[in-house]
Amino acid sequence: MKKIKITDLGIGLLFTLFFISAGVILAVNFRPLYYYDIKHLNIEKTSGVEASVIRENYDALIDYNSPFYKGELVFPTLPSSAPALEHFKEVKHIFVSFYYICAVTALLLIIAILYKRKRKDYSYLFPSGITVLVLPLLIAIACAVNFDRLFIVFHKIFFRNNYWLFDPATDPIINLLPDTFFMHCLILIIGIILIGSLCLILFSRLVRKGNNKFRSHS
């Protein structure tokens, strides 16, 4: 068994950050998931808001979270309190940071992969795949044990105030964003990370098989 290099683990960490950030970006912008949940989670009935209005306000929120959107958040038909708007501003900062992380890690990975390819060194693929696999498995276990608790802990870690505790009377948008929808988003993110991990592991096996064939014909 070959000894794992520190550089391989470093590349694995870059892949982990890349797939996490890419997963978050895709999950946030994958609107069909929410449109499906409007019916699946019966949001129209529980919120008392028509589906077309729900989509309109949700789209406004997602548009606002884009790094290319300039301006304040304004919901088309729903009122919002100052603390809620401040919370959404903090959320946007977090989402935008994922775009930066994705871009920086992608650039570093391109450099690392080209360097490794030049040296015909593909030893980083398998340990990278395993490294990427560890985090989603831990999160999946935590979700299975108690998603609600995980959701609360996440907010307490990333937010230094209680603005995320919405009052439906002043901020009815919270009625359109059930916890189960966020769990679905997390499952999608984990799925994207797992696919990335499996691709690295499978590619590692293909490279190893190719090298073995080359040696056998030499």
Image (cartoon, grey):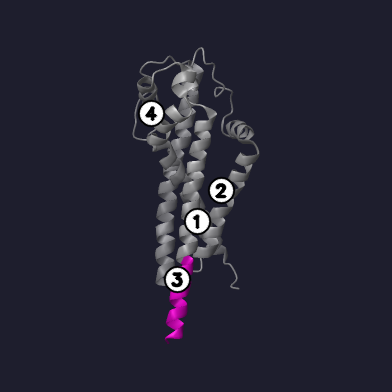
Callout in the foreground (4, 3): 3
Check disc 3 and give the amino acid type: Val
Which residue has dot 2 on it? 136
Residue 55 percent location from the top left of the image: 37, 25
Check disc 2 and give the amino acid type: Pro
Magenta region's main secondary structure? Answer: helix
Q: Nearer the viewer, residue 85 or 172?
A: 172
Q: Which span of residues is magenta-colored?
A: 204-218
Mark 4 Cα within 10 Å, few/some/many (few <14, many 20+)?
A: many
Mark 2 Cα within 10 Å, few/some/many (few <14, many 20+)?
A: many
Which of disc 3 and disc 4 is earlier in sequence? 4
Helix, strand or loop at label 2? It is helix
Residue visible at 42% across and 63% down in the picture: 113
Q: Quadrant of the N terminus?
A: bottom right
Which residue has dot 1 on it? 197
Residue 56 percent location from the top left of the image: 35, 23
Q: Quadrant of residue 141?
A: top right
Q: Quadrant of residue 97?
A: top left
Which residue has dot 3 on it? 207
Contact (Cβ within 8 Å) of mark 4 with mark 1: no
Residue visible at 48% across and 28% down in the picture: 41
Q: Nearer the viewer, residue 104 or 154?
A: 154
Check disc 4 and give the amino acid type: Tyr
Residue 64 percent location from the top left of the image: 38, 28
